[in-house]
């Protein structure tokens, strides 16, 4: 079952442009790895310049990404939710030990 509906994701987006950008990133080819760990989604998004960004979503309030965007939640975290809402294949897989959010002792910010 998806963490959020498309309508919920639109409401989380900081603006329409961020949601539109997220839809472009919401393709499996934009991700080098992706997984689901209970009510968490995680992934490594590959940016247009080849940079990789660690993305973590937990429940419906924690959306985190290591990208430099000032928009929060950013297009990467929204894209991960869109993949989930669209029913794309996200394998059950524990959060890797080297994923940025585990390295920070699971410290996150909530977006409400």
Image: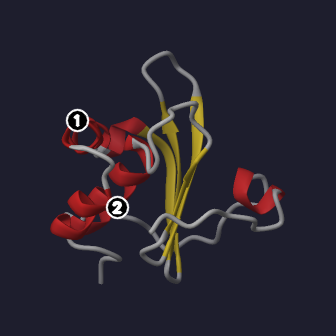
Q: Position of residue 81 (x, y in %)?
A: 34, 61
Q: Element under label 2? A: helix
Q: How is the image coloured?
A: secondary structure
Question: Which is closer to the viewer, label 2 or label 1?
Answer: 1
Task: Give me the disc on residue 51.
Answer: none
Q: Position of residue 67 (x, y in %)?
A: 57, 35
Q: Are marks 2 and 1 in contact (CB under 8 Å)?
A: no
Q: Residue at x 53, y 83 (%)?
A: 38
Q: Nearer the viewer, residue 10 or 27?
A: 10
Left or right of 1? Residue 45 is right
The residue indicated by pointer 2 is 81
Residue 31 higher or lower than 13, as above or below: above
Q: Residue at x 44, y 51 (%)?
A: 73
Q: Position of residue 64 (x, y in %)?
A: 56, 55
Q: Residue at x 42, y 75 (%)?
A: 60
Cα separation, mark 2 vs mark 1, equals 16 Å
How packed mark 2 is, by other alpha carbons closer than 10 Å (few <14, some 14-19, many 20 or more), is: many
Quarter of the image that includes the N terminus: bottom left
The residue indicated by pointer 1 is 17
Quarter of the image that includes the C terminus: bottom left
Q: Quadrant of residue 91?
A: bottom left
Q: Nearer the viewer, residue 3 or 91?
A: 3
Residue 72 higher or lower than 56, as above or below: above
Residue 73 higher or lower than 5, as above or below: above
Q: Is residue 107 visible?
A: yes
How packed mark 1 is, by other alpha carbons closer than 10 Å (few <14, some 14-19, many 20 or more), is: few
Q: Is residue 88 visible?
A: no
Q: Residue at x 82, y 56 (%)?
A: 103
Tell me which numbered mark, 2 or 1, is placed earlier along the sequence: 1
Q: Element under label 1? A: helix
């Amino acid at each position: 079952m998806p963490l959020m509906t498309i309508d919920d994701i639109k409401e989380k987006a900081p603006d329409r442009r961020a949601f539109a950008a997220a839809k472009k990133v919401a393709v499996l080819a934009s991700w080098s790895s992706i997984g689901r760990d209970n009510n968490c989604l995680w992934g490594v998004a590959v940016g247009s310049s080849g940079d990789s960004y660690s993305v973590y979503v937990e429940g419906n309030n924690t959306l985190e990404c290591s990208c430099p965007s000032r928009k929060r939640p950013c297009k990467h975290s929204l894209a991960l939710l869109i993949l989930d809402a669209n029913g794309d294949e996200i394998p059950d897989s524990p959060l890797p030990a080297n994923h940025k959010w585990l390295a920070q002792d699971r410290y996150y910010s909530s977006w409400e």
